Amino acid sequence: MTELLIVPYKSDYKQDLIRLSYEWLEKYVNVEPEDERIINNPEEAVLNDGGFIFFAQYNNEIVGTVSLIKLEKENTFELAKLAVTEKYQGLKIGRRLMEKCIETSRLEDAQKIILFTNQKLIAAIELYKKFGFSFVPIGNNKYLEADLKMELELKN
């Protein structure tokens, strides 16, 4: 029987975060300084400021991850570093990670979730649209490779 669990970050998973993040970044875009800061210092960059990192555990193997970075303004989270290892794509693991992020954001009384992406990431963009994310002007952007911004207004 296959089992998929969404589990929170613990230091034992740091190498999985690095592996999964670099796997997709190197395939689709260039790894940037901001990516490296988040991936290599998850406690400082995400968790210590009230953010979350979740992992998809499929049959006891870590196969996916996503980060929710708490932003200072308007009770907003930034969804970042969504990745599912290629071997396990198509099993709705990304969908489950997204559901966990939206559920957590609501529990934290967030008003919205934003994300930055690249138009090359067609499958990810389609997933975001299915969850109700819409395109907004990109404005200030800390990622060099991101050419799109999306957001989801949360109605608690």
Image (cartoon, rainbow, N blue to C red):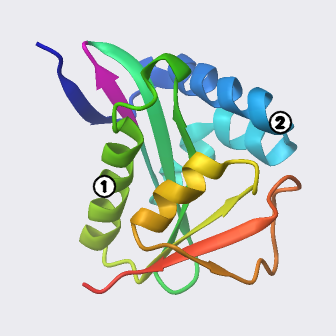
Write down the region rendered in magenta.
55-59
Above or below, comparing residue 124 to residue 41 in the picture: below
Quarter that holds the C terminus:
bottom left
> Which residue is at the front of the view, 19 or 40?
19
The quarter of the displayed image where residue 92 is located = top left
Q: Residue shown at 81%/57% (left/top)?
A: 143
Q: Residue shown at 56%/50% (left/top)?
A: 124
Q: Does 56 appear in magenta?
A: yes
**First in residue order: circle 1 vs circle 2:** 2
User: Dot 2: within a 10 Å radius of its alpha carbon, few (fewer than 14), some, or many (20 or more) residues?
Assistant: some
Compared across the picture, whether 123 is left or right of 51 comes to right
Compared across the picture, whether 92 is left or right of 125 comes to left
- Is residue 148 visible in this depiction of the protein? yes
Q: Does 126 appear in magenta?
A: no
The quarter of the displayed image where residue 64 is located = top left
Reading the image, the residue beneath label 1 is: 99
State the predominant SS element of the stretch in magenta: strand
Residue 55's spot in the image, x, y percent?
A: 39, 33
